[in-house]
Image (cartoon, rainbow, N blue to C red):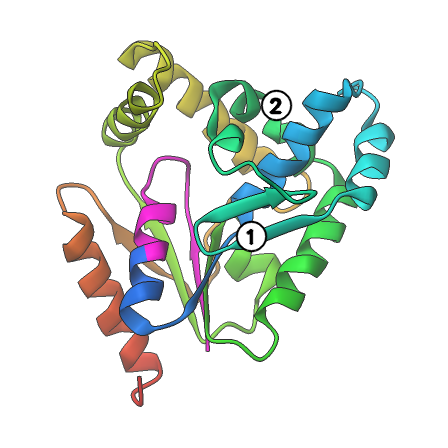
Amino acid sequence: MIITLDGPAGAGKSTVARALARRLGFRFLDTGAMYRAVALAGMRQGVDWHQPQQLAQLAEKLDIQVSGEKVFLDGEDVTEAVRTSEVTAVTRYAADNPQVRRLLVGLQRAAAVGSDIVTEGRDQGTVVFPQAECKIFLTAGPQERAQRRLRDLRAQGEPATLEEVLSALQRRDREDSSRAVGPLTAAPDAVQVSTDGLTVEEVVERLASLARSRYPTR
C-alpha cells in the first residue's frame, strides 16, 4: 500500500508521515530531503544556479539514500545539513529542474516497489504515485506553519524572527504552486486534512483511521 502526504511547507508533513509510518509498520520516504541533498551538493560544488544543466549533471553522479529519518549523500550522513536555512533557500533550484525531478521521481518510485510506504512531499499523489491507494493533502494556516518553522530553526541554533519566517513561507508557497514541473496541488482524490490546533498524535490517529478504511486488513 502507498500512502502519499502532500502539502505546503510547515504543515507538519515530515513529522506526521514519520509517526504514521511507525504506527502502521510502513516504511517512510522523505522526498523533500532528496531535493535538499541535491541542493546541498550543488552548494558544495559551487554550481551556477542559473545554469540548470550544471545541477542536473551533478545530480546524476550523486548517491542519495533516504533511510527512515536519515539522509545520506555519497555515504555521508547529511540529515542535519540539509535542514539549514541556507539549503532551504536554494532547494527550489533542484525542485524546479526538470532533469533533477525526473531522476528523483525514478528513485522514489523504485523505493516503493514491493513495499508498504508512507511518502511525503509536494507532488506525491499527483505525479509520483497517482495510483496510490490513500492520498492525503495536509494543510495548516500560515501563522501556525511559520511558528512551527521558527521553532525548528531555533532548535538548530539559527536566529530568525516570526516575520522573516512567515515572509519566507509565503514566498515559498507562491513558488511551489507556480512551479512548471511538479507544482504543489492537491490530487483530485486526495483527502484534505488541516492540522491547525491538533497535536501530532491527533493528526496521526485521524490519518491512520483513514488509511485503514482504504486498506481494512491493516
State the separation of the CA atoms marked 2 and 1.
20 Å
Query: Where does the image place residue 60, in percent across and percent down from the top left?
Result: 82, 45
Q: Which residue is mark 1?
A: 66
Reply yes or no: does residue 71 show up in magenta: no
Query: Where does the image place residue 89, in percent across and percent down from the top left?
Result: 55, 21
* Helix, strand or loop for disc 2: helix
Please report the residue visible at 61 percent of the width from the left and 23 percent of the height from the top: 90
Answer with the quarter of the image where residue 147 lies.
top left
Answer with the quarter of the image where residue 159 lies.
top left
Q: Residue furthest bottom?
A: 217
Q: Which residue is mark 2?
A: 90
Residue 175 vertical placement versus 56 (above, below): above
- The quarter in which the C terminus is drawn is bottom left
Q: Is residue 128 left or right of residue 173?
A: right
Residue 218 vertical placement versus 125 (above, below): below
Mark 2: few/some/many CA within 10 Å (<14, 14-19, 20+): some
Part of the protein shown in magenta: 1-18
Reply yes or no: does residue 15 show up in magenta: yes
Query: Where does the image place residue 213, in percent across and percent down from the top left?
Result: 28, 80
Viewer-side label of 2, 1? 1
Please report the residue visible at 35 percent of the width from the left and 22 percent of the height from the top: 153
Disc 2 to disc 1: CB gap under 8 Å = no
Please report the residue visible at 29 percent of the width from the left and 31 percent of the height from the top: 145
